[in-house]
Image (cartoon, helix red, strand yellow):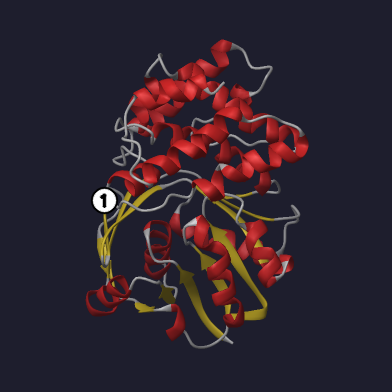
């Protein structure tokens, strides 16, 4: 067994975490599908830009087919829709008593578990701001919640070790016994981010716009109802309180949560979401099928209607396919789906 930490996916999340781990004295191997990114890291190092720290870190990077050896610690940081393929690629490199930490967006633990075994999966919630800029360069734009937990809520020696390592990245990192509450809470917040990504306006500007708070509230309520029907106790983070989007929430509570989300996003140099960046800049598929579509499907199985979430998925696909432009008017159309 080898001792390095393997970061599978060296983009925004993986690059930022891996660089921090190296700065903390860990040996890290980056694995990434982008040959130009791998080459740049090997030739020049991984450069982290942004207000938190700026540094160029010497590191080893390989393509998935170039990785050799068996490892105890693998952090999976690929886009959610690449999770299953990455899980199959990494499983032969995972020690029998090793684990995969899913530092991603969505409920990817449920995708990884059938491939590697549920006993070898650790839940992880990340909300910090970061972007892949170019081969060998990642921008770390803002601190935010980092949470880790065993899927069954136990406190184990291995999850305590993961928490200590994440604490080297952010000294406010949390060890939780309710990781599903954070992951489902992020699904609500993520649905709101997908809503903002229908436009060219910043996250903060859309959330602050009183014209569109009602439709965004209805969208969040749909996801919250599905979580509730699934017996999930939702957790709050970074100014986002999922209780403010429950059927029993008052208008004042919902408005306050919007205001707090706006305030949080105003402090980050990352004005737009990674979703928007995928649509407007990188012109590639988003994670909508791995983040919002599962909510629609779970809702359908539980008898909880999600018409706004379902229409949101369709509209994101239309933008991906070049059939719809980014515009605030998209939120007007989304509202009609209710």
Compared with 328, 14 (above or below) is below
Asked if one can make out residue 257 in the rendered structure from this viewpoint, the answer is: no
Query: Where in the figure is residue 143, as x and y percent of width and height?
Result: 40, 45
Q: Is residue 234 left or right of residue 281?
A: right
Relative vertical location of residue 163 with respect to residue 39 in this rendering, above or below:
above
Q: Which residue is mark 1?
A: 50
Q: Is residue 198 above or below residue 212?
A: below
Where does the image place residue 71, in percent across and percent down from the top left? 57, 80
Q: Nearer the viewer, residue 304 or 267?
A: 304
* Residue 169, x across and y down, in percent: 44, 57
Label 1 Cα neighbours within 10 Å, binned few <14 / some 14-19 / many ≥20: some
Residue at the far left in the pictured view = 44
- Residue 181, image x and y in percent? 66, 41
Q: Quadrant of the C terminus?
A: top right
How many marks do you count on the picture? 1
Which residue is at 41% across, 14% downward?
210
Residue furthest to the front in view is 323
Q: Residue at x 36, y 51 (%)?
A: 130
Q: Secondary structure at mark 1?
A: loop
Indicate left or right for 221 with 43 as reference: right
Q: Quadrant of residue 275?
A: top left
Residue positioned 63% across, 26% down in the render: 243
Q: Is residue 17 visible?
A: yes
Query: Does residue 111 lie above or below 42 as drawn?
Result: above
In the foreground, 27 or 106:
106
Quarter holding the N terminus is: bottom right
The answer to which quarter of the image holds residue 164 is: bottom right
**Quick check: 329 left or right of 244?**
left
């Amino acid at each position: 067994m080898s001792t390095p930490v393997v970061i599978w996916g060296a983009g925004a999340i993986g690059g930022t975490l891996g660089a921090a781990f190296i700065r903390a004295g860990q040996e890290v191997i980056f694995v990434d599908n982008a040959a130009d990114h791998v080459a740049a890291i090997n030739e020049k190092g991984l450069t982290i830009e942004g207000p938190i720290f700026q540094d160029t870190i010497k590191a080893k990077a390989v393509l998935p087919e170039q990785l050799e050896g068996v490892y105890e610690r693998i952090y999976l940081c690929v886009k959610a829709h690449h999770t299953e393929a990455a899980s199959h690629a990494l499983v032969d490199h995972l020690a029998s008593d090793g684990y995969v930490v899913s530092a991603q967006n969505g409920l990817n633990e449920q995708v990884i578990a059938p491939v590697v075994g549920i006993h070898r999966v650790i839940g992880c919630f990340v909300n910090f701001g970061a972007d892949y800029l170019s081969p060998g360069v990642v921008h770390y734009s803002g601190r935010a919640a980092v949470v880790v937990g065993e899927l069954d809520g136990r406190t184990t020696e291995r999850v305590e070790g993961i928490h200590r390592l994440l604490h080297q990245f952010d000294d406010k990192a949390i060890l939780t016994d309710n990781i599903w509450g954070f992951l489902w809470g992020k699904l609500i917040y993520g649905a709101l981010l997908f809503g903002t990504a229908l436009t060219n306006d910043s996250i903060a500007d859309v959330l602050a716009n009183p014209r569109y708070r009602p439709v965004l509230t209805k969208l969040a309520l749909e996801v919250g109802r599905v979580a509730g029907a699934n017996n999930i106790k939702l957790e709050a983070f970074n100014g986002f309180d999922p209780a403010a989007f429950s059927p029993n929430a008052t208008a004042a509570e919902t408005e306050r949560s919007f205001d707090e989300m706006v305030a949080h996003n105003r402090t980050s140099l990352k004005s737009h979401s990674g979703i928007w960046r995928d649509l407007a800049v990188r012109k590639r598929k988003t994670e909508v099928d791995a983040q919002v579509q599962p909510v629609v499907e779970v809702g359908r199985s539980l008898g909880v209607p999600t018409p706004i979430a379902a229409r949101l998925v369709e509209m994101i696909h239309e933008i991906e396919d070049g059939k719809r432009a980014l515009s605030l008017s998209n939120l007007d159309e989304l509202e009609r789906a209710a």
